[in-house]
Amino acid sequence: MKKITGADIVLESLKKIGIDTVFGYPGGVVLPLYDRWPSHPEVRHILVRHEQGAGHAAEGYAKASGRLGCALATSGPGATNLVTAITDAMMDSIPVLFITGNVARNLLGRDGFQEADITGITMPITKHNYLVMRAEDIAPTFAEAAYIATTGRPGPVHIDIPKDVFIEEADFEWPEQISIRGYEPFPFINEDEIKNAVQLIRRAERPIIFAGHGIIQADASKELMEFAEKSGTPVLNTLLGLGSIPQDHVLSYGMMGMHGSYWANHAASNADLIIGLGMRMDDRALGRFADLNPTANVIHVDIDPAEHNKNIITTTPIVGNVREVLKILITQFEPLSHIDWIHWIDELRRDHKDSFKVPEVDELTPQYIESRIAEKIGNEGVVVTGVGQHQMWAAQLMNISRPRQLITSGGLGTMGFEVPAALGAQVAEPNRTVWTICGDGGFQMTNQEIATMIDENLPVKMAIMNNGFLGMVRQWQELFYGNNYVSVNMSQPDFVKLGEAYGIKSLRVSNKSEVDDVIIEANNHPGPVLIDFQVETEGNVWPMVPAGAALSETVETSDQVKAL
Amino acid sequence: MKHTLAALVENHPGVLNRVASLFRRRGFNIESLAVGTTEQEGISRMTFVVEGDDNVGEQVEKQLYKLIDIIQVSDLSREESIVREIALIKVRSEKNNRRDILDLVEIFRAQAVDITEYSVVIQLVAHPETVDSLLENLAAYPIIEMVRTGRIAMLRGPQAISVPTTEPVEVARFHQASGRRPEGELPYISE
Ligand SMILES: Cc1ncc(C[n+]2csc(CCOP(=O)(O)OP(=O)(O)O)c2C)c(N)n1
Ligand SMILES: [Mg+2]
């Protein structure tokens, strides 16, 4: 067998694990890798403008497609620029392979030029990480890394490779088998716990499902609906669980949590059985843990046993892939129905729907724009968001009904996610229309990736909700800090000129009447489009569960907040 | 309550760092930690003592399992186990008190492993509480240096903590079992 360089082994390994696209940025120590790239045209390299962008693009790619994403950076500053994206992928369990170069082996640990202890840094923010010290270890490491990143609870895996390992030659031997003693991603589903769960389900009078990201990751949407229908159980979604059930499904009651609906939050608080499916009982979704619903029984299905009993005490924890678990559960009971309970929730919904809809005002509101975009692109489009008010309105009003339709930063809440993640989603899904709902704040964190879109012909539609404020922070200052606005009011560049400077179609909208036409115009344009929507500046997201409050304390107006 | 946990870990570089980092991040309080080799090549054993209620014990165990390099974790405080620690204690001692110190050594079934004109080094292998008790009895003498290993533990009887057997996974198949995209073409393998 002819020996090849470490760089060639890296690229061959990427092909073996099915990575067709790498979002990357070169630098000194990865030059030997880039030098070999032209011989491996099967792996597309997309040159971003900032490594954080590479990371979020890889996340967007992975979230949109369910496939493993990949980002690459050089040592030192290149590597540390990836850190936010790695943490984001960790918090949201997104399968991404992060590759960095490092200084040559004989320089490691000597504080040489552009050395950062990046494996030390990424240890707590990855599912696993590696420092590869021999060219012959590259192939087995990549095989293992891809396996770890995509199985069990998915997550980011980081591989750090010193410069001279790219140059060293070795045989390319792709392993046929993987055996990791400390890793069991296909746990055996405990029959006793299934039996316990079935008993609780049969006995429940007011059951409720919390359907999370795990449903989407496990492709369990169909099973979720079957289970909900057979057990007559209403379904709530966490932010990242949106799309696991269509909004117009009879048993779908939308999003719960800090900006969830009044009825969803009260249903969660009044249920006698909580069935958490592929979700991690996060504080933004559940409010104050102690008062979520202390008397309810809790069935919690998650592939990661460490999520059980972490935040709330579980009556029946079930460890397993949520699709496999649901498939079993569905066969274990006769059809059930809970008419009174559903009527109770329906009535709440009727009484409180005003706090959860597009305001009927003349001004241009983000709620209006976002609902119009949703209407025009339908569920086959992809919606990406930044973090802030515009994100919550997207979650509430964009009718997210298909798995992988919504791509948003949940756990970490990373502003600046919106532009690069949309770019990555468009790479993964070239045939879908990708819209990204941007905050004027978040957009300015990573908007340089517009240049990448142009290079790579990615027709992303960017809708900036330009309220002139760090809106979500302003809302908190208004409501919880007595209107004391500090450092939330920003001057903006002329976004249209900025877009034009990059050479893309750029439009400005300040009237409601123009919205539909502009959306259609953007959809019909073959390239990227930027739209500066000059929206109402001081709108607030309602309803709201104030930080640290219980879901049952959901408020719908500023007056109610003041009365707290 | 104290939990004594034993973990079998891959002897990979950085594994101690991973464990320490996890304890720091999750706010678990390590009271003692002992690391050493085992009967199996490539596998080390870590023994932790962690303070906290049962919920903390459960979380420590589960969080440890999330580390890929951790193979097996057992909470030995739940079962009958032998718990030991080694202490070396250097006491300033002269002729006039040496006999008293050596009496204590005998009572505690310790050993005097080094005796000079001005000092005695006592070695004790015992349950940590016994070590504490010896130290209390030595309080009257000037202890000039002391070192303890932290506890190690082992189940009583024939059962042992061992590495579970894992079935190797066919690389070309793993994606199918992973539960995603069951109907579609396979995302991960290019050939
Ligand atoms: C990187 C980062 N920095 C700070 C924050 C805190 N933060 C949360 S929302 C928000 C305001 C976002 O403003 P903008 O992007 O304009 O969106 P809007 O809320 O106005 O819709 C800020 C600063 C964050 N989430 N991420
Ligand atoms: Mg804003």
Image: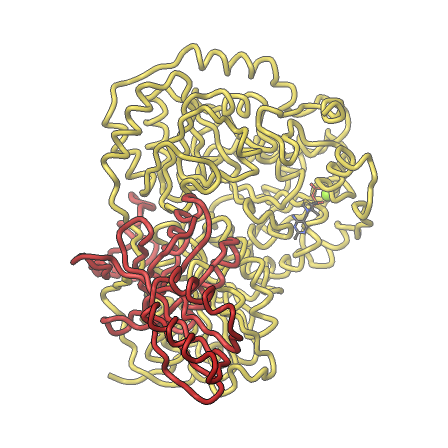
Chain colours: A yellow, B red
Q: Where is residue B153 shown, x and y percent of the image?
A: 31, 61
* Total numbered labels: 0
Q: Where is residue A84 shown, x and y percent of the image?
A: 58, 58
| Quarter of the figure with residue A552 | top right
The one of A317 and B125 positioned closer to us in this rendering:
B125
Which residue is painted at 43% across and 68% down in the image? B16
Query: In the image, B69: left or right of A494?
Result: left
Which residue is painted at 40% across and 26% down in the image? A297
- Which residue appears farthest toward the left when viewing the image? B158
Q: Quadrant of the C terminus of chain B?
A: bottom left
Q: Where is residue B94 shown, x and y percent of the image?
A: 48, 84
Which residue is painted at 24% across and 83% down in the image? A1
Q: Is residue A99 visible?
A: yes
Query: In the image, A381: left or right of B33?
Result: right
Which residue is painted at 43% across and 20% down in the image? A250
Q: Is residue A22 visible?
A: no
Q: Where is residue B18 shown, x and y percent of the image?
A: 45, 64
Query: In the image, B163: left or right of A125?
Result: left
- Which residue appears farthest toward the front when viewing the image? B96
Q: Is residue B89 above or below residue A382?
A: below
The one of A231 and B29 positioned closer to us in this rendering:
B29
Q: Is residue A73 above or below residue A324?
A: below
